[in-house]
Image (tube, rainbow, N blue to C red):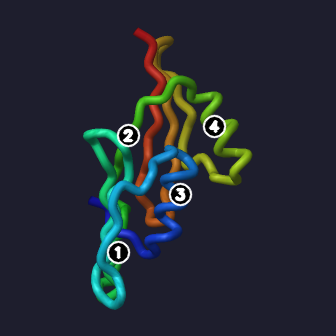
Amino acid sequence: MIFVKNMDESIQFYHEILDLPVNKRFGGIKGPEIAFLGDSETQVELVCNPEKLDGIYGSNISIGFDVVSVDNLISDLQKKAIPIYDGPYQPTAKLKFFYVLDPNGVSIQFVERHH
């Protein structure tokens, strides 16, 4: 679960960089709003609660995703003006990764692995 400041902005971000569709979205209108993103068994849950906007956002959260090509994803993100937060790093010939931040400060790692 990731607490977000703005549900629409966060959904757009995760859809743009990860192509995650909205699976379920409910609540809102002065109460908490919840959205589940993804079309597989593992999903990202976003929660927006306008009454609790007191610094509970992403600075201590990190999530990771495997990707086919770090270089291709970096190129795609640059075209969308999404900044690279850290990296890319290649500690071994079989591992390459980098990080971006979502609109709430959540660190997202993208990892390319070669077996």
Amino acid carrying label 1: it is Cys
Q: Nearer the viewer, mark 3 or mark 4?
A: 3
Residue at the disc numbered 2? 64
The picture places residue 111, in percent across and down from the top left corner, at 45, 30
Work out whether mark 3 precedes mark 1 in sequence or the reverse, and give the earlier one: 3
Question: What is the C-alpha distance between the residues marked 1 and 4?
Answer: 28 Å
Amino acid carrying label 2: it is Gly
Quadrant for residue 3, please give it: bottom left
The picture places residue 47, in percent across and down from the top left corner, at 31, 69
Work out whether mark 3 precedes mark 4 in sequence or the reverse, and give the earlier one: 3
Tell me if mark 1 has few (under 14), some (14-19) or many (20+) residues whose alpha carbon lies within 10 angstroms of its own: many
Which residue is pictured at 33% across the width and 90% down the height? Answer: 30
The quarter of the picture where the N terminus appears is: bottom left
Which residue is pictured at 40% across the width and 36% down the height? Answer: 65
Residue at the disc numbered 3? 13
Residues 45 and 86: in front is 45
Residue at the disc numbered 4? 74
Q: Can see residue 60?
A: no
Secondary-structure class at tag 2: strand
Question: What is the C-alpha distance between the residues marked 2 and 4?
Answer: 15 Å
Amino acid carrying label 4: it is Ile
Above-or-below relation of 12 to 50: above
Work out whether mark 2 precedes mark 3 in sequence or the reverse, and give the earlier one: 3
The picture places residue 72, in percent across and down from the top left corner, at 64, 30
Which residue is pictured at 52% across the width and 48% down the height? Answer: 100
Above-or-below relation of 33 to 102: below
Q: Residue 48 got which mark?
A: 1
